[in-house]
Amino acid sequence: MSNTKIVVLRSKEVITAAIFVGIAVIVLFVLLGFLFTGKNDSKTTAQSSGDQKYEAGVYTKELTIGDSVVNLQLSLDEDRVKAVEFVNLSESVETMYPLMQPTVEKLSKQLAAGKTMEEIVVSEDTQYTEKILVETVSEMLKEHTKN
């Protein structure tokens, strides 16, 4: 003899189970949608809500050192300082002031790492050079800060 089993389902139970499965699938898709798109939405809303600190761009300011004039270039994103560097630094200025280039590179690394002007570490060896550069960069940041 065979072991045949007969299962009787009521249509009310089948419909209720299908509705619960449908709701579960919809909730799953909604949660996955928030999971994968929530990060991008929070970034764009943060930018549109006024978290932008600077006017993005590349800005140059002349700096007089002794008898020479050098151009200090500041690259800004909307929320951070990208780089600080000299533009067209002549060999005569570089020879007369050998600490200028390493000092601006050190300053650029600290600002690009997210430090504020108040957090900049000034070393004893190059304190006067750094003071001039920090003051100039501070002026440039004040000029290009969003209100």
Image: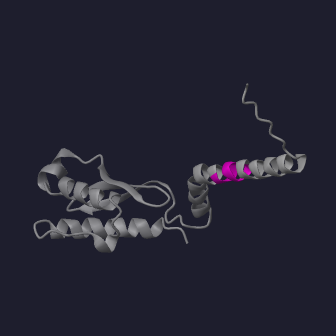
Q: State the residue in front, 78 or 21.
A: 21
Quadrant where the C terminus lies? Answer: bottom right
Q: Is residue 103 above or below residue 123?
A: above
Look at the image and tell me whether residue 68 can be seen: no
Percent position (x, y) of residue 40? Answer: 58, 53
Query: In terms of secondary structure, what is the magenta stretch mainly?
Result: helix
Q: Is residue 128 above or below residue 87?
A: below
Left of 70 or right of it: where is 3? right
Percent position (x, y) of residue 110? Answer: 28, 61
Q: State the residue in front, 8 or 4.
A: 4
Percent position (x, y) of residue 70? Answer: 28, 54
Given the current orientation, which residue lies at the most extreme left position?
A: 125
Q: State the residue in front, 12 or 76.
A: 12
Given the current orientation, which residue lies at the most extreme bottom position?
A: 118
Given the current orientation, which residue lies at the most extreme right position?
A: 11
* Residue at 57% across, 63% down: 46
Look at the image and tell me whether residue 87 can be seen: yes
* Residue at 29% across, 57% down: 108
* Residue at 84% across, 42% down: 8
Which span is picked out in magenta?
26-31
Q: Is residue 68 above or below residue 10?
A: below
Q: Is residue 11 above or below residue 76?
A: above
